[in-house]
Image: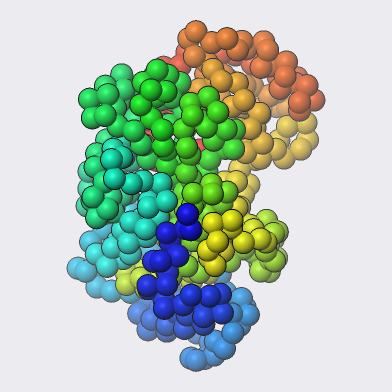
């Protein structure tokens, strides 16, 4: 099955090959720059020196200045392109690690939010069909929240869905699955893992499809779900800055296709800022089209990304982005080497009974806390030994009761090692 996003993109851009789509993007980039120059105080200042109508090729665009998350945190209202009375949703992100009391603030109009509903509507077609019953384990109480947008897209597809909200109580969630005969879940990766471990039987008997979103997904989690629970796992990459949605997997389950009608996605060298060739991993930089409240131009996401050099086997002309590896700089120092969280995740989550872990490096002592299932077959000693062999260090490892597990509160915050 070809990625259903292709239809959306042809419909919205009238382009059905790469060349026509590149022309569409060039036109949209120019339109976005003009609009931001006209209406946003921030971009007026940033693009002072740029003459109108200068953009002739996509290569020209690669010399435009970047926008950084810190700038969005420092002066969000300077990005706003419309009167605040037309803003229908404001999202404030408390990014961890920032020293600013106030986080990034993002504004959306109804039309902005609707673009994401359109994207999800076609994106979900690869995963869901008539007869599926979906539990949306995302916040969805307020208008324009992620859960609300997902629900709207599934309503359009006439797929039965329920906004459950973030996971707080596994017994409650387990009953919910049974009572509503749920077979598909949209969830944060670690929440889905947690529920699958705590409610093994219900999960095994009822759930056959998962959409993991809102944080990067360790490969070992996907493997565990597909092999041990026989669940088909789709993953999605998005950030609030892109209106939550950005790129989603087709039925090949081998990387994302991007909403190329609304988002221009570049991969740049995180140090030099140079645009990288397909196949090379760097930092994802996004420019958003068709946005009324707050278009972003060359916004540095801080996330790893790479375009795949080959076309997807689904047969679409859309490009394929490799699955996200998470945040750049999400490292810890082990044995004088910067080890990325994704590497630690792949190591720790190979242990089926491990719900979560934390790792602290203080005064050259590595303290590892392991959150194991109560009836765990994996012991602290086994994991400690394997860790020490793998990373060639000595550690202090201890187990914690799983009710102390750090992942259940603060659930929409992306996981980090610090
Ligand atoms: Zn595909």
| Residue 323 seen anywhere in this rendered image of the structure | no
Kindly identify the residue that appears in the image at 42 percent across and 69 percent down: 9
Image-quadrant location for residue 182: top left
310 vs 61, left or right, is right
Query: Where does the image place residue 225, in percent across and percent down from the top left?
Result: 51, 30
Please state which of residues 70 and 158 is positioned toward the viewer in this rendering: 158
How many dots with numbers? 0
Question: Residue 362, image x and y in percent?
Answer: 66, 27
Does residue 378 appear to the left or right of 107 in the view shown? right
The residue lying at 62 percent from left, 25 percent from top is 350
The structure residue drawn at horizontal position 56% and vertical position 13%, both measured from the top left corner, is 399
Q: Quadrant of residue 203?
A: top left
Residue drawn at point x = 33 percent, y = 46 percent = 129
**Position above or below: 361 against 16:** above
Image quarter (top left, top right, bottom left or bottom right) of the C terminus: top right
Q: Is residue 354 visible?
A: yes
């Amino acid at each position: 099955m070809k990625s259903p996003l292709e239809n959306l993109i042809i419909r919205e851009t009238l382009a059905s090959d790469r060349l026509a789509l590149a022309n569409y993007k060039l036109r949209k980039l120019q339109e976005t720059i003009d609009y931001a120059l006209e209406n946003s105080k921030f971009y007026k200042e940033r693009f002072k020196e740029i003459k109108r109508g200068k953009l002739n090729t996509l290569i020209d665009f690669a010399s435009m200045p970047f926008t950084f998350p810190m700038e969005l945190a420092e002066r969000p209202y300077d990005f706003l392109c419309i009167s605040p009375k037309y803003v229908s949703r404001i999202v404030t992100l408390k990014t961890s690690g920032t020293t600013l009391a106030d986080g990034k603030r993002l504004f959306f109009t109804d039309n902005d939010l609707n673009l994401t509903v359109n994207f999800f509507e076609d994106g979900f077609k690869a995963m869901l069909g008539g007869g599926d019953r979906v539990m949306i384990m995302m916040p969805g109480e307020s208008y324009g929240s992620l859960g609300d947008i997902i629900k709207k897209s599934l309503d359009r597809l006439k797929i039965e869905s329920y906004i459950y909200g973030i996971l707080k109580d596994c017994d409650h969630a387990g009953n919910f699955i049974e009572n509503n005969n749920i077979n598909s879940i949209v969830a944060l990766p670690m929440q889905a893992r947690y529920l699958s471990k705590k409610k093994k039987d219900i999960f095994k008997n009822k759930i056959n499809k998962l959409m993991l979103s809102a944080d990067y997904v360790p490969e070992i989690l996907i493997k565990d779900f597909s092999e041990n629970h026989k669940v088909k796992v789709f993953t999605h990459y998005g950030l609030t800055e892109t209106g939550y949605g950005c790129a989603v997997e087709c039925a090949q389950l081998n990387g994302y296709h991007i909403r190329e009608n609304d988002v221009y996605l570049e991969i740049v060298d995180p140090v030099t800022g140079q645009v990288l060739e397909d196949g090379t991993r760097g930092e994802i930089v996004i420019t958003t089209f068709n946005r009324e409240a707050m278009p972003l131009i060359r916004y540095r996401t801080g996330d790893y990304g790479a375009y795949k050099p080959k076309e997807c086997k689904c047969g679409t002309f859309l490009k394929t982005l490799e699955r996200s590896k998470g945040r750049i700089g999400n490292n810890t120092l082990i044995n004088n080497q910067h080890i990325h969280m994704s590497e630690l995740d792949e190591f720790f989550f190979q242990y089926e009974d491990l719900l979560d872990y934390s790792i602290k490096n203080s005064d050259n002592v590595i303290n590892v806390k392991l959150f194991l299932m109560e009836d765990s077959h994996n012991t602290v000693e086994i994991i400690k030994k394997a860790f020490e062999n793998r990373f060639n260090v000595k550690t202090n490892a201890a187990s914690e009761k799983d009710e102390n597990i750090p992942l259940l509160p603060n659930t929409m915050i992306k996981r980090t090692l610090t």
